[in-house]
Image (tube, rainbow, N blue to C red):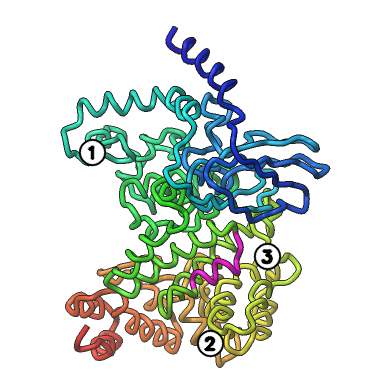
């Protein structure tokens, strides 16, 4: 009975509320994109998207495919009583037809065509002094979201005053469970937010992503990306902005997407990443700061609507040192989405990839040596996908600008060592084929991957990779790099010495001697 009355009320209010009177603006959408693609309007403005093309288009809030960038939006709300509240046409609009949405929330909101995600746009909603949503619109939102509000109200009655809540309504008590998620399929619970929250709380973000990646057939299905979104959301709810240190690009960076979308619900898009960048800069070690700013780079790329030059510019503004990790995040996010293009999977997200030119987009930054070098370091993934053969990949690095070659050859060590299962013998054989002047860079790339895979490794398990080299020169390069890397990983001199002590002789003594006396 209650649901029937609720349904009647929704129908009545839908008739009364839509369209909402106020300023109106038209945006045309076609196969060429949105026109205008950049728009500034006042709060309360209705934007009407008119399909002037010959194919079907589907305007929706970023980020693809969850559409939850605009507050309260989400593709899962289509075909529900909340559909009229979300920035999402919820279906393709055919030629000559239109979709309208009224923007009440201040901010800069990016959007895309769900059927062709490379088509992007942005609506900047300027504040209106003392603006209030129209009464009927607010009443509609209250009614359709009443069950959720009721749930919060009931929970409030049983939650002790001052007790911190997770995701707005869950508590530490809700996280308790008899389920052993180490043996459960994470993909099977991806649509249940509480279950995902419990799983991430129990096994962590990294393990959750690893399991999803494997369960989905190593990114073979779209379910991988969607589930990784939910892990990112849960990770942000549990760990806040620290989740950006734990996310990976598995499942086309779904974790970064989900975490950033969760952040977006609490932050205006104008200063979306300010808190994150401040947090990253406060971290104690260079390694932690790098990893954190790497996540910021993913965020800049995602919220720029995959406008790579714009994301690079945002990283540049972070200043020397901080921008290096940010650049790698931008280029890695681009490559994670470009994999759709290179493998033929749809839909395409980024336009900053060329199946014919392995040097694109690195060739677009001839006047910025640092950006170009960072790009080439990551671009080895594209060269590997397009060229396949090691001699051709080596030639790709030889053709790179002089300032980028060292990092390019380091990228060969990283990329192909990872591809072949992080085996020292394989890295040795592979690096022996690069020009002798870049042999050390190739070995360092392979070694750094092994070290970074274990992160803050106080037991020096990664030293086993160095020990696995049969070539004395390669082994020496690996240990020497590891020794120089230790002070960036740990603050405590005693911890640094403890890692050195686990090296083989005589590399242990050399490591001790290389440590700074004042960490």
Q: Quadrant of the N terminus?
A: top left
Mark closer to the observer (1, 2): 1
Q: Quadrant of the C terminus?
A: bottom left
| x and y percentages locating residue 419 in the rendered image | 55, 65
Mark closer to the observer (2, 3): 3
User: What mark, if any, has residue 439 been given in the picture?
Assistant: 2
- In front of the other: 416 or 205: 205
- Mark 1 Cα within 10 Å, few/some/many (few <14, many 20+)? few
- In front of the other: 373 or 423: 373
Queried whether the magenta region covers residue 422, the answer comes back as no
Residue ID at (61%, 90%): 402
Against 438, residue 349 (above or below) is above
Chain part drawn in magenta: 306-315
User: What mark, if any, has residue 353 been given in the picture?
Assistant: 3
Does residue 231 show up? no
Q: Which residue is mark 1?
A: 172
Query: Nearer the N terminus, badge 2 or badge 3?
Result: 3
Q: Secondary structure at mark 2?
A: helix
Q: CA distance from mark 2 to mark 3?
A: 28 Å
Residue ID at (34%, 23%): 150
Q: Secondary structure at mark 1?
A: helix
Residue ID at (54%, 36%): 86
Residue ID at (39%, 73%): 465
Prevailing secondary structure of the magenta residues: helix
Q: Quadrant of residue 457?
A: bottom left
- In front of the other: 116 or 94: 94
Queried whether the magenta region covers residue 308, the answer comes back as yes
| x and y percentages locating residue 218 in the rendered image | 55, 50
> Do residues under tags 1 and 3 come within 8 Å of each other at their CB atoms?
no
């Amino acid at each position: 009975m209650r649901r029937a009355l609720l349904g009647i009320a929704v129908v009545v209010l839908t008739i009364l509320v839509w369209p909402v009177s106020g300023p109106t603006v038209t945006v045309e959408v076609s196969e060429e994109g949105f026109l205008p693609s950049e728009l500034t309007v006042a709060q309360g403005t209705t934007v009407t998207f008119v399909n002037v093309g010959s194919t079907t288009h589907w305007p929706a809030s970023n980020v693809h495919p969850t559409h939850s960038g605009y507050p309260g939006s989400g593709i899962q709300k289509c075909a529900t009583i909340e559909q009229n509240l979300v920035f999402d046409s919820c279906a393709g609009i055919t030629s000559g037809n239109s979709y309208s949405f009224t923007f009440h929330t201040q901010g800069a909101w990016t959007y895309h065509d769900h059927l062709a995600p490379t088509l992007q746009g942005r609506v900047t909603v300027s504040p209106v002094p003392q603006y209030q949503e129209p009464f009927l619109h607010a009443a509609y939102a209250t009614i359709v979201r009443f069950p959720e509000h009721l749930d919060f109200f009931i929970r409030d009655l049983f939650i002790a005053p001052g007790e911190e809540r997770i995701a707005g309504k869950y508590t530490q008590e809700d996280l308790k469970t008899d389920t052993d998620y180490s043996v459960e399929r994470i993909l099977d619970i991806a649509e249940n937010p509480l279950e995902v929250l419990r799983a991430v709380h129990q096994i962590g973000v990294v393990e959750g992503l690893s399991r999803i990646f494997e369960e989905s057939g190593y990114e073979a299905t779209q379910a991988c990306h969607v589930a990784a979104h939910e892990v990112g959301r849960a990770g942000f709810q549990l760990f806040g902005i620290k989740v950006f240190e734990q996310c990976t690009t598995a499942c086309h960076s779904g974790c970064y997407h989900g975490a950033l979308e969760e952040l977006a619900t609490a932050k205006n898009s104008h200063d979306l990443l300010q808190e994150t960048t401040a947090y990253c800069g406060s971290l104690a070690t260079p390694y932690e700061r790098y990893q954190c700013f790497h996540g910021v780079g993913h965020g800049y790329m995602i919220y720029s609507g995959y406008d790579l030059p714009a994301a690079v510019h945002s990283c540049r503004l972070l200043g020397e040192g901080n921008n290096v990790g940010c650049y790698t995040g931008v280029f890695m996010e681009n490559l994670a989405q470009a994999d759709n293009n290179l493998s033929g999977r749809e839909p395409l997200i980024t336009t900053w990839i060329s199946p014919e030119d392995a040097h694109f987009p690195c060739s677009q930054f001839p006047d910025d040596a640092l950006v170009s070098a960072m790009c080439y370091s990551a671009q080895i993934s594209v060269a590997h996908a397009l060229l396949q053969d090691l001699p051709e990949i080596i030639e790709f690095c030889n053709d790179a600008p002089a300032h980028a070659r060292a990092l390019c050859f380091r990228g060969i060590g990283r990329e192909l060592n990872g591809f072949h299962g992080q085996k020292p013998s394989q890295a040795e054989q592979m690096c022996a084929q690069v020009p002798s002047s870049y042999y050390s860079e190739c070995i360092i790339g392979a070694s750094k991957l092994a070290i970074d895979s274990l992160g803050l490794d106080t037991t020096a398990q990664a030293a086993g990779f160095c020990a696995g080299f049969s070539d004395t020169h390669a082994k020496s390069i690996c240990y020497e790099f590891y020794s120089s890397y230790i002070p960036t990983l740990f603050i405590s001199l005693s911890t640094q010495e403890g890692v050195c002590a686990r090296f083989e002789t005589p590399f242990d003594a050399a490591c001790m001697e290389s440590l700074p006396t004042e960490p």
